[in-house]
Amino acid sequence: MAHPHDKYADFEGLREQAVALRQEGLSRRQIRDRLHVYNNDLLNRLLEGEPPPEWTKRPNAKDDLRERARGLRLQGWTYDQIQVELGCSKSSISLWVRDLPKPERRDPGEQARLACRKRWEHELAVRDEERRRTKSAAAEAIGELSDRELFLLGVGLYWAEGSKDKSYDRRENVTFVNSDPGMIEVFLRWLDLLQVERERLRFAVMIHETADIAGAEQYWADPVGADRSAFNKTTIKRHNPKTVRKNIGDSYRGCLVIKVLKGVDLYRRIEGSWYGIVVSVREADHRNRT
């Protein structure tokens, strides 16, 4: 009876078969089972110098997960936390990070705070998405404005944000001040509708003294299509050290002031139109009540 190891006696012949199978694209396990070679040292010798086929190599996605898992472990994350974050098995995580030091054990109170913060971050993300969808749907519902709709909108905007005449101080001029570029854009389009020539407009910036004044002037010059040199002198607001201002930082650009020259007649039309809107609302309300 032949000894079970006799089949290994013809090493070169066995190697020829192993190499041929490798070049056909078989994995180590497939070659092992095909040739019945269960000795790993012998299998390594038979396949020495033969690269594995591409399909047996680990996907890049796994490499990325492994690196992310190691990074999270180094930050002190537990296996459970990494599993939830990456969606992979604990056995894989254990294999990837077993050489790294174990994180210090957190007290239950800190773990509860971390879990609470995680839930709150998720809740904020859900709210942000709901907010985005609501705003997007509302914006799409507006559609194209008619000239009449734009006219009424402009009258309302001006009466909310523009200068107004007082019985004790007659100033029938048109001056509009706002910090919202969108509001400025709508107001300028409204002036175009009323055929107010751009040559009659004067611009100026109103801003706190601690802000980037030159940057703010350029910021407002772009949307109105005017050179900074065409702006009137910027109005500087002095800072009151007793107040805590929130409109600070790179996003703070102050307000833009738009003044219409020879605007007495335009002002009277605005005020009259506003009172017309108020009367119309009152009459509609009276009809609904009777």
Image (tube, rainbow, N blue to C red):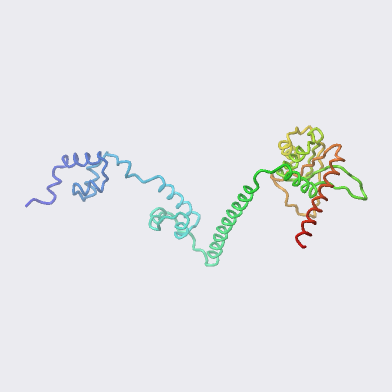
Quadrant containing the C terminus is bottom right
Residue 249: x, y in percent?
A: 70, 47
Residue 254: x, y in percent?
A: 75, 44
Nearest the viewer among 178 and 14 is 178
Nearest the viewer among 85 and 210 is 85
Res 26 → quadrant? top left
Nearest the viewer among 171 and 257 is 171
Nearest the viewer among 196 and 9 is 196
Res 56 → quadrant? top left
In the picture, measured across the screen, residue 18 lies left or right of residue 261, that is left
Residue 260: x, y in percent?
A: 82, 38
With respect to residue 15, does 92 lie above or below?
Answer: below
Identified at 77% across, 56% down, the residue is 284
- What residue occupies the far bottom of the structure in this picture? 108
Residue 244: x, y in percent?
A: 76, 54
In the picture, measured across the screen, residue 200 lies left or right of residue 26, that is right
